[in-house]
Image (cartoon, rainbow, N blue to C red):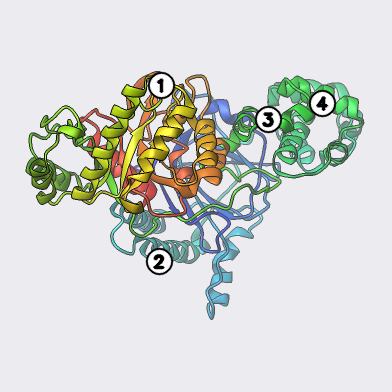
Amino acid sequence: MSDLMDSLYFEEGFSIRLNADSDPFFLLVDYSSRSYPLNMANQHYHDFFEIFITLEDEAAHLVNGRYLQLRKGDIIFLRPQMLHMSIYPRRTTAQRRIIINFNDSPIHGMGYQIDKIKALFDSDVPILRLPPEDLSRVINRLNDIFTAGKKKNSGWQLEIYSLFILFMLELMRASRRGKYSEEKQPVLPDLKMYAITEYIDTHYMETLSLREIAEKFAISPFYLSHQFTRVMGMSFVSYIQKVRVRYALQMLSYTGVRIHDIITNCGFASSSQFNRTFSAYCGMSPSDFRKLGSADKDIIISSLDPERSEVVPSAFPPRFRTLPRKRRGIDGMKIGVIAEALAAPDPAVLREQLSRLGAETVGMNASTCFEWADCYRHLSDRRLSELASAGLDISVLIVDGNGLASADEEKRKEAIAECNAALRAAVILNSRAIGIVSPEGAPDIFALSLSEIEESAENGEITVAVVPVIGSAVDGFEGALKLSRKDGKVSFLLDPLALLHEDKENTFSFFEEVFSMIGDRIEALLLKDRLDGRTVNIGKGIMAKTYPRISALLSHSVPLIRAGYDSVSIADDILYMRRIFL
């Protein structure tokens, strides 16, 4: 069996997604690992179906408070609203698993067959342990899905959904031969404590006392208190408080429910108890929390809710929605690189390198890319025509904004002239935009310079975009908001990583706010990543969980430019960008 499971394709961190979990046709296949420290995460549920495939021995699952021991190759079927949680052993290595989430999508005329497949989720013990011949066929179906998700050929979404139906059909056919027997149960006190946590998670809004729960589960209060702390790693009272605060955080963040009603809905006895408990866990009062920005709220919520940082952020009750998620793979979206990273000696070599990498477009500073001149003003029409004849798709020309925010009028006029020269080059090169890197200096002076540049932008044929930079005249997201309110024409080249302060956690809600406010003004995305101050492959640093979510927020086609200058990881980064965004 072990050798058979080793034939299953697996890549840590890889995932395949069709649509958002709110869409009728939703599918997510997640390949990743989890380890012992996550054992203490609370149980959760969600509104979609889940299939959990364990790739290691010695894992377990809590399903509605019931402890189920697993072996390698076991398949768990979790229907919507089923409370569950993974349990991992004390091991130094993480446990690999595959999780498949999907919605109940009706296929007209096939209701009877679909109901037979859904019956897999209705068993009293919803686990399949298949014989080798059946498991081999199931693995082959999963490998087909993995391969299609990697290749992403034309029409790959339909291909993957079709393969998923065949995978489910294979499971249904094999289910009658599946056998599972409960084994290696933990000691009785552990089982009872798990059942008590399930009761708390579903009755948190009621009055819960140690004595009443002890009577309900036929044990003494002293024994319950001692065993609960041993098994769950926190006291009985602390567990109840944490569950209630988690629900309160969700209601404070995503609803307009009055604090007085939240107190009642979450089971707190009084406003003083609520304020005291909330402050102990969150470091502030509920009213102060509600005043925070979405990014800061999300940091606090995530600190109490490890499950929230999983691949599917909505896997936490109750389901409160924020922004509607957009679908990925928008027609016309192109993958590109910053040309300077390839260090090509001439346009012909650059075009060849792009073709080899599978990149479709570039962003470049044409004044320095090929060492022809030190600025756009010194680029001759002949040089620009030679570059245009190379047939490169140049989405955006980058121009240094130094001087545009200077109080020195001579320097400011010189910087404006450089931008106007970049506009002229953009027309010759058929670029869609110039991207001005925000300089240091006064925001008001920069806005004045920008308005003068926009007047020269070929009657609107070339877009003038700004790269917000923390600490510059356009100071990150807040600076971009202020500029957009002042200048109704300006667009943005958005570098999501550059919007984050070094000491600020990367949170999805922060980017939901960014895209809700300036999403329609984004001319291109500049993508890179870092970890501990070092440049790393895209998707390997602090943006690893956020780029997939950002891809769901894009509402229109924009070039996706790999912005780092490190040439070693370009090929891997382009593959990542294509997989995540397209």
Mark whose residue sits in front, 3 or 1: 1
Relative to residue 77, is residue 414 depicted above or below? Answer: above
What's the residue type where badge 1 is placed? Glu
In primary-sequence order, the first of circles 1 and 2 is 2
Count of numbered labels shown in the rendering: 4
Tell me the quadrant of the picture where the N terminus can be found: top left
In primary-sequence order, the first of circles 3 and 1 is 3
Q: Position of residue 403 (x, y in %)?
A: 34, 24
How far separated are the C-alphas under marks 2 and 4? 50 Å
Which residue is nearer to you in this view: 513 or 431? 431
Name the residue: 74% across, 37% down: 252
- Secondary structure beneath dot 2 equals helix
Location of mark 2 (residue): 162
What's the residue type where badge 2 is placed? Ser
Mark whose residue sits in front, 2 or 4: 2
In primary-sequence order, the first of circles 2 and 4 is 2
Mark whose residue sits in front, 4 or 3: 3
Q: Position of residue 347 (x, y in %)?
A: 10, 42
Instruction: Tell me if mark 4 has few (under 14), some (14-19) or many (20+) residues whose alpha carbon lies within 10 angstroms of its own.
Output: many
Location of mark 3 (residue): 292
Furthest residue to the front?
409
Location of mark 4 (residue): 224
Residue 9 visible in the picture: no
Q: Where is residue 447 in the image (x, y as percent from the top left)?
A: 45, 33
How far separated are the C-alphas under marks 1 and 4? 62 Å
How far separated are the C-alphas under marks 3 and 2? 44 Å
How far separated are the C-alphas under marks 3 and 1? 28 Å
Mark whose residue sits in front, 1 or 4: 1
Relative to residue 272, is residue 396 depicted above or below? Answer: below
- Secondary structure beneath dot 4 equals helix
Location of mark 1 (residue): 440
Q: Which mark is residue 527?
A: none
